[in-house]
């Protein structure tokens, strides 16, 4: 018999009754039922119930066991007594009568429990992550993550993609965040950068004649902690294709992402035919460039109903042609208490309030706004929004460029409060026609609004003749349930167009050559039209596992202060290391 086990803890069945078995694993828990000890033994594969009564030669040993001891157990497989079957366990019809035990690894007192799924302070969980990973739900999430990666790889290869590995030590690149820098010992005073994404390398692969690339790529960004991204590093399904239009990318990737979701949706509906929603429409209807389409609330502009009305606040605003009034319908929200609660919520979000109209019995509008604009305008708003008695509408006004994100938050809040969100489905969509540029208020300049390597719609002619802020890009995202899970674009592969695009954003041609020399040179020697995307592995797994915390689907994440509490990183370098790297530390003054 094998030194440690003849079976795993998830393998034994009725067909194994009367056999001798050897198992090794962790003591999940020990229960004393009237002098009979029941030990649940756990390993990666499952749990098996083991039994010792006072007649068992191992009884005295089992009495000493504590949670998470690692033990080997020999015994006879037998049928559980009638009425004690556990249908929730694959091994729930059998148990092992213990004959011999060996302690392989005793455990000290635990800093956090493994049995059960109770909440525990995050810093403790991260410091003792090896214990946290033994817990059933987190353990299963990590296995799901691996299975999602397998599904992605299989589906990408079926679509004719080949997997490549691009360098980790590379040059600094403006991807929208700070680089992690690595000092070079061989080249004093010079630094490598960890890749924020394999963007330039995957485009260079297309220049090199490879046609369809993908990679499960690690990406590194020295960003402040964000709720929707792990600090330090994350993984993405990175993709690039040659001789493709935007539609070709969609046709190749839509079945891959849909299929991955269907593999792990556990029966929940997944969008079959994805809608394509222009950025401007997404902002206008949903107040988000990553709308949650499970929320059926659609916002509408209602400016005309307030123009010249008795509600002077909105009427005066509308004298400025750039201002608008948007309505957010609230089906079933037509009570004073609910409307007041939404108004208070808006004030908590830093807004002056949230105007509303509610429709009571008979369809008559009520509330301060209704009183000011009169029954005719109130009825017109109700008809436009398709509302009825017992419903309400909430209003935001001003420059849409400044209020659309708040309007989106209000739509989400209403959806949650009024049960307008079907949480048992995955709604996927393409968001298209992103603006190429945006105005940077802080630096008072035009800057790229998205990926700087995207092809502008209209090409070089648009860059030369259009107002930059009106140019749209062949740039697209995938939205799912309120999250951006992928982003991509058709690339700007013409050198003169690339230079002009960067020039508009304030980069001179020499700076483009200096910073993107490899790609710039490659464009001079026959560059194919190409495009691609990158899908966030972490966010996809998070959605499929039904959690909203990325730490619940990652093996060894950092905390919100970007510290690895398990390994003690970041840590100080020794004087010898710094000397070898020709680096001197210049710490900020305290206090």
Image: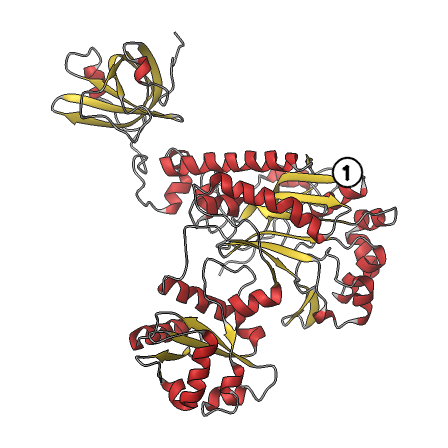
Image coordinates for residue 317, horizontal then vertical, percent: 53, 86
Q: Examine the rendering and report whether any part of residue 182 can be seen.
A: no
Q: Which residue is mark 1?
A: 210
The quadrant in which the N terminus is found is: top left
Q: Quadrant of residue 45?
A: top left
| Tag 1 secondary structure | loop
Tell whether 370 sits left or right of 74: right
- For the view shown, which residue lies furthest in the right direction? 525
Q: Does 144 sit left or right of 220 as displayed? A: left
User: How many labels sit on residues?
Assistant: 1
Quadrant hosting residue 495: bottom right
Q: Residue 565 or 183: which is nearer the viewer?
A: 565
Q: Is residue 321 left or right of residue 491?
A: left
Of residue 497 and residue 490, the one placed in the foreground of this image is: 490
In the rendered view, how is the structure colored? secondary structure
Residue 4 position, x and y percent, is 38, 14
175, 88: nearer the viewer? 88
Residue sitting at 34 percent across and 70 percent down?
A: 332
| Above or below 256: residue 34 | above
Residue 40 position in % (x across, y down) = 27, 25
Q: Is residue 218 visible?
A: yes
Q: Is residue 86 above or below residue 188?
A: above
Could you tell me residue 289's position as x and y percent?
Answer: 56, 62
């Amino acid at each position: 018999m094998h030194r440690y086990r003849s079976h795993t803890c998830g393998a034994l069945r009725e067909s194994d009754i009367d056999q001798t078995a050897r198992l090794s694993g962790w003591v999940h828990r020990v229960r004393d039922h009237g002098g009979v000890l029941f030990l649940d033994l756990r390993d990666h594969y499952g749990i098996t119930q083991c039994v010792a009564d006072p007649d068992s030669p191992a009884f005295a040993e089992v009495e000493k066991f504590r949670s998470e001891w690692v033990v080997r157990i020999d015994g006879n497989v037998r049928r559980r007594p009638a009425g004690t079957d556990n249908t929730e366990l694959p091994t729930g019809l059998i148990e092992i009568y213990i004959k011999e035990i060996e302690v392989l690894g005793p455990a000290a007192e635990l800093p956090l429990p493994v049995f059960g799924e109770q909440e525990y302070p995050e810093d403790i969980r991260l410091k003792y992550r090896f214990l946290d990973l033994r817990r059933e739900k987190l353990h299963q999430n990590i296995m799901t993550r691996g299975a999602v990666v397998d599904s992605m790889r299989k589906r990408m290869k079926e679509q004719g993609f080949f997997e490549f590995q691009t360098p980790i030590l590379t040059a600094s690149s403006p991807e929208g965040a700070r680089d992690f820098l690595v000092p070079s010992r061989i080249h004093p005073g010079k630094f490598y950068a960890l890749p924020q994404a394999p963007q330039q390398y995957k485009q260079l692969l297309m220049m090199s004649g490879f046609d369809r690339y993908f990679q499960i790529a690690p990406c590194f960004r020295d960003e402040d902690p964000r709720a929707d991204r792990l600090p330090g590093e994350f993984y993405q399904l990175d993709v690039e294709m040659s001789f493709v239009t935007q539609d070709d990318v969609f046709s190749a990737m839509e079945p891959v992402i849909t299929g991955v979701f269907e593999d792990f949706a556990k029966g929940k509906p997944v969008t079959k035919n994805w809608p394509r929603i222009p950025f401007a429409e997404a902002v206008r209807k949903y107040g988000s460039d990553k709308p949650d389409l499970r929320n059926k609330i659609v916002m509408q502009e209602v400016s005309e109903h307030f123009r010249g009305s008795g509600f002077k606040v909105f009427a005066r605003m509308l004298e400025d042609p750039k201002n608008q009034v948007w309505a957010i319908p609230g089906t079933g929200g037509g009570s004073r208490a609910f409307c007041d609660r939404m108004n208070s919520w808006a004030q908590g979000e830093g807004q002056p309030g949230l105007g509303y109209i509610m429709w009571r019995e008979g369809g008559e509008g009520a509330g301060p706004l209704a009183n000011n604009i009169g029954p005719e305008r109130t009825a017109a708003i109700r008809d436009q929004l398709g509302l009825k008695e017992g419903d309400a509408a909430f209003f935001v006004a001003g420059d849409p460029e400044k209020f659309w994100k708040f309007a989106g938050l209000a739509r989400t809040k209403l959806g949650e409060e009024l049960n307008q969100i079907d949480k048992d489905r995955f709604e996927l969509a393409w968001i298209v026609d992103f603006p190429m540029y945006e105005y940077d208020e802080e630096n008072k300049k035009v800057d790229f609004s998205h990926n700087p390597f995207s092809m502008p719609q209209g090409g070089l002619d648009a860059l030369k003749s259009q107002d930059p802020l009106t140019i749209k890009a062949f740039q697209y995202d995938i939205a799912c349930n309120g999250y951006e899970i992928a982003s991509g674009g058709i690339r700007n592969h013409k050198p003169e167009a690339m230079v002009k695009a960067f020039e508009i954003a304030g980069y001179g041609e020499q700076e483009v050559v200096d910073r993107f020399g490899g790609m710039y040179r490659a464009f001079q020697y026959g560059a194919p039209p190409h495009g691609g995307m990158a899908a966030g592995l972490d966010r996809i797994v998070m959605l499929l596992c039904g959690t909203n915390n990325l730490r619940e689907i990652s093996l060894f994440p950092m905390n919100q202060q970007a510290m690895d509490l398990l390994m003690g990183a970041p840590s100080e370098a020794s004087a010898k290391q710094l000397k070898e790297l020709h680096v001197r530390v210049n710490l900020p003054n305290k206090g």
